[in-house]
Image (cartoon, coloured by chain):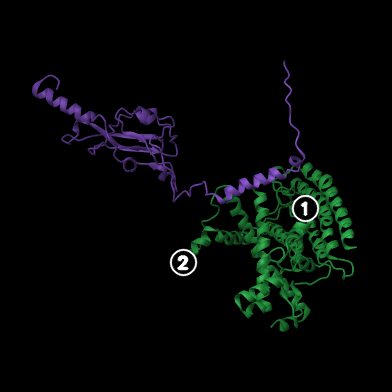
Chain colours: A green, B purple
Amino acid sequence: MPEHFLGLHPAVLAVLKGVAVVIVIFPVAAACSMAERKVCAWIQGRPGPNRALPPLLAWVPGIWILQRLGLFHLAADGAKFLFKEEPLPDHVHKFYYVLAPVVAMVPAFTTVTVVPFGAFIGPAGEPVPLMLANVDVGILAVFAVASLGIYSLILAGWASNSKYPFLGGIRASAQLISYELSMTLSVLPVFLWVNAPGTAGTLSLARAVEYQGGAWFVFTMPVSALIFAIALFAETNRQPFDMPESEADLVGGFHTEYGAFKWSLFFVAEYANMIVGSAVFTLLFLGGWNILPGVPLASLVLFLHRATGSLLWLHPLAQGILSTLIFVGKVFTLIFIFMWVRWTVPRFRYDQVMKLGWQKLLPLSVVNLLAYTLGIALLQH
Amino acid sequence: MAVIKVQRKSLTLVERTYFPQVFGALMTTLKHFLGPAETMEYPEQRPAIPAHYRGVPTLVMDPNGREKCVSCQLCEFVCPPKAIRITPGSIPEGAPNAEVEKAPKAFDIDMLRCIYCGLCEEVCPEEAIFLQKQYSMSGYSRAEMVNHKDRLYELGGTLPDKHFKWEVKKKAEKAANEGGGHA
């Protein structure tokens, strides 16, 4: 079956993978928006959306659980966005106005393809990562494509031809440029560590995970992890850094003039970015698909095989599913933390965001990089 | 004017990183996240309404099932937004409570006008109109928002009576007719 699949024409393969990304990430991102509403409600002592239930499904036993979780509100919201009127204001630059949500979606979905989400143990005992596009540049591809997402905000802000979206777009560009520096600098120590002298140089995320079979980088490089996490909040425009949206001072920020499905595309792109961001954080600092620090996937599989006596655990498919579940569990935990922080910490003022980015995080990440460079040089020589 | 200089403590290094505060805040929100919801799921769960609540005005009967309103129209007169409209009618001779003489033929309260001030309840000499516990009132048309007499009695029901004013009066009258003097 896998051989058959890999034997397909590359173009067909690419289309299949693209469709896979859309049909997985779109609902997951939408589900995240519902999770956000529920987490918000629970933190604020409310039950949250829990009413919608299609009458056709009311007879299903246990369906009330899904109803209480607001799952049908999600479907209703999605359907609403599809069927309501698509407003196209008169004063906008129409081509770019329509283009902006598409530009938001493309990088968000493209980065998903280069993120490994699981692994199985190959015949030689080496972990083989599961990913849609196994590119060598790994983290560079993620950074390069993810930073294209900013163009959608700038484009939306400018094409709306209206002052608040414009200010939102300007803030977005300034903020993303400021935090991308510290983010990239905070990741460098990880790859300095991974690329020990004498081994083949790599920027692959899967290699970084393999390296964390022992201690996770969050323990060996806490400062890097912290800077990366803060920059991630800023890069994904999440509270307390949601300057581009900032509804208190900018109405709705860059998407003020958007409505209906085009607006929901921005929304989904934001959550897709969050998912990819959490995934990259998990891969770089939280040990990826290794279940606990010091327990790599291979040991876990062997342990399960010995404990249950089942040969099932030696099958690549079972290992793939197990590792994917571990990975997805970590990613969702991180997404919950994103939401938890959003409903806890108030939004920074714009000057505070700039000050934090340039005067605190950037020097800290430079010092961190220097310290680890010296430390790694001393350790490895 | 005396100027009081307030000593402001400067923040420690740890405090200036914000992390202890953010961590404390996260713990607070986590507590609420895990705790029960503070809200009530309205149509299924209703709040307990205190006895003195001023809800929709209603007409009441006394425990003997007699309608208490005598259509004196004081409430109609006092009503600030002119929400009450009464058409007086008379009680026919020979009815068990004929001595009351009058009862409303029609009694309409326009709930689109009513301001729930309670002046009607306060002014009523017969204790016939009460603002009771009903707090939500909705309808699809203006006509639906007018409470007519039968609806007002349905909402009001029967309330305990402390005086039985008309029975006492009747008895006194009877005693006077029979033996003279007061009972």
Q: In the rendered view, does A40 fall on the left or right side of B122?
A: right
Question: Which of these two is toward me, A196 or A94?
Answer: A196
Tag 1: amino acid: Ala
- Specify whether disc 2 shares its chain with disc 1: yes
The mark that comes first in sequence, 2 or 1, is: 2
Q: How many marks?
A: 2
Instruction: Give residue A251's position: percent from left, percent from top.
Output: 69, 45
Instruction: Kindly indicate the quadrant of the structure image that contains residue A325.
Output: bottom right
For disc 1, the marked residue is A231
Instruction: Kindly indicate the quadrant of the structure image that contains residue B100.
Output: top left
Instruction: Give residue A275's position: percent from left, percent from top.
Output: 70, 61
- Mark 1 belongs to which subunit? A
Instruction: Establish if A189 lies above or below B134.
Output: below
Secondary structure of the residue carrying tag 2 is loop
Instruction: Establish if B92 lies above or below A202.
Output: above
What is the quadrant of the C terminus of chain A in the image? bottom right
- Mark 2 belongs to which subunit? A
What is the quadrant of the N terminus of chain A in the image? bottom right
Residue A23 visible in the snapshot: no
Instruction: Establish if B75 lies above or below A325.
Output: above
Q: Nearer the viewer, mark 2 or mark 1?
A: 1
What label sits on residue A61 in the rendered view?
Answer: 2
Q: Residues within 10 Å of mark 1 (few under 14, many from 20)?
A: many
Instruction: Kindly indicate the quadrant of the structure image that contains residue A202.
Output: bottom right
Q: Residues within 10 Å of mark 2 (few under 14, many from 20)?
A: few
Question: Which of these two is toward me, A201 or A41?
Answer: A201
- The CA span between labels 2 and 1 is 45 Å
Q: In the rendered view, does A302 fall on the left or right side of A195?
A: left
Tag 2: amino acid: Pro
